[in-house]
Image: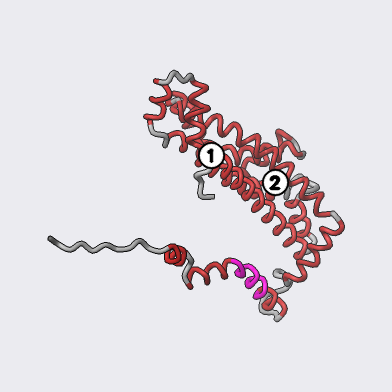
Amino acid sequence: MSDTITESPPRCEEIVASARPGISGKIFETASLFGPVLILLIWEILSRTGILDARFFPPPTSIAGIFYEQFSSGAIFVHIRATLSRVLVGYLLGAIPGIILGLTLGLFKPIRMIIGPIIAALYPVPNIAIFPLILLIFGLGDASKYVIIAIGAFFLVFYNTLSGVLQIPQIHFDFARNAGANKFETYRYVALPSALPMIFTGFRLACGTSFIIIAAAEFIGAKSGLGWLIWMSWQTFSVSKMFVGIVVLSLLGYLATLGINLLEKKFVPWSNY
């Protein structure tokens, strides 16, 4: 009779120890925390010593001083409010139709074959290239900003939604049909939940694109907004104030993306975000 070797299961302490990050993992974690601070420190030193031209790259401490002045006086909040309102309205005007049309074309092949080529032909046209035409039609007010952002957000949400629907296994639709689900119930309980991960990917891409578009759109035909602040700072060679506008715009985009990630965790609990 052969001898059998039995191994005792690992102890709890061993499992916990193996799950802890190693030395290299701790180094990367530390670098991720202090990396931005280190970059700012190097930037400060290079600018103060003259290695970097302070006219174009003022020291971060100088930028921080202008940053404090803008916030303490409340002047920056006027531009933040203007930019955020334009992005929010334009984003919703583009994202909602993008979801609806993406679900529809994904579920109905005949409609996809008719409308799909039209959207594919319009998508490569740069948003900025058609912005003068939009200004002619909608004027220099906020309406033109809403439209140009909506166009940029629409395509990204639409294509991600369409891809999400096309990746759903056919058996899901067969099961819903056999269960007696109508068209609306197929939308609500099959297509939409299954496509949500891709839809939120479209949301994130559209969010970043919206802030890129609004920055360019506010360069022309605007008298408020962070893009206008950056443009006016460039015209007056106020480089520190220009960096303030850039940093605030980047921060708003980052916070908006975090908000989308939180929504995804709520509606798509299995998501990695």
Q: Position of residue 178 (x, y in %)?
A: 39, 20
Mark 1 surroundings within 10 Å by alpha-carbon count, few (fewer than 14), some (14 through 19), many (20 or more): many
Mark sitting earlier along the chain (1/2): 1
Dividing the picture into quarters, in which one does residue 89 lie? Answer: top right
Q: Position of residue 158 (x, y in %)?
A: 53, 36
Check whether the beta carbons of the residues at disc 1 and disc 2 lie within 8 A of each other. Answer: no
Query: Which residue type does callout 1 highlight?
Result: Ile
Main structural element of the magenta stretch: helix, strand or loop?
Answer: helix
Between 123 and 162, which is closer to the camera in this rendering? 162
Query: Which residue type does callout 2 highlight?
Result: Ala
Name, please, the residue furthest toward the right: 73
Residue 199, numbered circle: 1
Boundaries of the magenta span = 33-42
Mark-to-mark CA distance, 1 and 2: 26 Å
Residue at 71 percent of width and 36 percent of height: 136
Residue linked to disc 2 = 217
Q: Would you place residue 41 above or below residue 140 in this image?
A: below
**Local SS, label 1:** helix
Q: Position of residue 160 (x, y in %)?
A: 50, 39
Residue at 48 percent of width and 25 percent of height: 186
Quick check: is 35 in the magenta stretch? yes
Dividing the picture into quarters, in which one does residue 232 lie? Answer: bottom right
Mark 2 surroundings within 10 Å by alpha-carbon count, few (fewer than 14), some (14 through 19), many (20 or more): many
